[in-house]
Image (cartoon, rainbow, N blue to C red):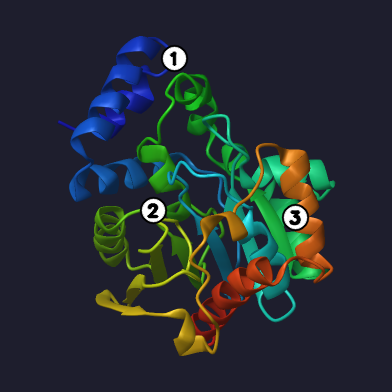
Amino acid sequence: MNIAKIVFDQAETHPDAVKEMLLELSERGEKVSEILDFVKELEKRKITVPNPQKEKIFDVCGTGGSGKKRINLSTILAIKLSKKFKIAKHGNKAASGRVGSFDLIEYAGFTVCDTPEKVQKKLKEKNLAFVFAPAFHPTLKILAPIRKMIPNATIFNFLGPLLNPVENLTAQMVGVPSVSIGEKLSEVSKYLGKNILFVHDNFFSLDDVSIGGETIFWEVQNEKITMGKFFPEDFGLKRITDFKKISGGDSVARNFEIFSELMSEKAPQSHLDFLEINKKVATNFFEKF
């Protein structure tokens, strides 16, 4: 049974039944084959951003799902990386009441790219485009009300990073909130032939590179998976073991304050180091392509 097809076909006519399906998947744990089915179904229904010249274009994002007060690190990271790489940051607003990347992007006044033309224009002009997922995956718009009824992360939190609509996307760094999700998504990416570095903060249980301790990674390249680990001192940085020193706020306004401090490099050293280690790891991976 292809659960993905049932979910997409019945989202409008049977929302309560779809909600129960998504909850059941979340509670028992999504199988690799099921995640793959969802990705394939959404790939069939997406609006593609053409990249006929096969330019090198990258993405950085996290799946979410940690349940902690977070700064919007991947948004800041995307801006910093765009000084060197073309970045098409694919994302959405928060599905469960927290501050999502596009909540901050909209609040900050950045252009939200909701058409292929806008994405192409921003990549050409700024090396950076904020690609709003629902605009390129119409099916996700239909599912949005159902997702808002579910307080915990669902399969769609994990699918997002695999659904960037830019054609011939070169590579990505994706944060995952657990080892099990990292294992599953790396297997899915291998089958799909994607180049993705999945990272998991095994100290704070965040979907980022860790500044507190061990980072577990899965590097997917050439349909092979390499798994390993590293630590902040491997990048010349000291560990920060108090989560309060790298946490975010309760509101988009507070996260925007932190964002502004980081952009102007006037943030506390703990936040600066947290950004720096993520930037170094992403840069090292992207430079391989």
Quick one: which residue is furthest to the left in this view? 1
Of the image marks 1 and 2, the number of the one nearer the N terminus? 1
Of the image marks 2 and 3, the number of the one nearer the N terminus? 2
Q: Work out whether 222 lies above or below 148.
A: below
Question: Where does the image place residue 130, in percent across and percent down from the top left?
Answer: 69, 54
Q: Quadrant of residue 125?
A: bottom right
Of the image marks 1 and 3, the number of the one nearer the N terminus? 1
User: Residue 12, which numbered label?
Assistant: 1
Q: In this figure, which residue is indicated by the disc labeled 2?
A: 177
Identify the residue at horizontal 47%, vertical 80% (top origin).
232
User: Which circle, 1 or 2, is nearer the viewer?
Assistant: 2
Q: Secondary structure at mark 1?
A: loop
User: Which circle, 1 or 3, is nearer the viewer?
Assistant: 3
Q: Secondary structure at mark 3?
A: helix
User: Which circle, 2 or 3, is nearer the viewer?
Assistant: 3
Q: Quadrant of the N terminus?
A: top left
Amino acid type of the residue that numbered disc 2 sits on in the rendered structure: Pro
Identify the residue at horizontal 39%, vertical 56% (top origin).
205
Q: In this figure, which residue is indicated by the disc labeled 3?
A: 258
User: Residue 220, which numbered label?
Assistant: none
Name the foreground residue: 13 vs 28.
28
Identify the residue at horizontal 42%, vertical 58% (top origin).
204
Q: Quadrant of residue 183?
A: bottom left
Question: Where does the image place residue 137, in percent across and percent down from the top left?
Answer: 53, 39
Name the foreground residue: 119 vs 51.
119
Question: Where does the image place residue 153, in percent across and percent down from the top left?
Answer: 40, 36
Question: Where does the image place residue 48, in percent across and percent down from the top left?
Answer: 56, 51
Q: Is residue 172 visible?
A: yes
Q: Secondary structure at mark 2?
A: loop
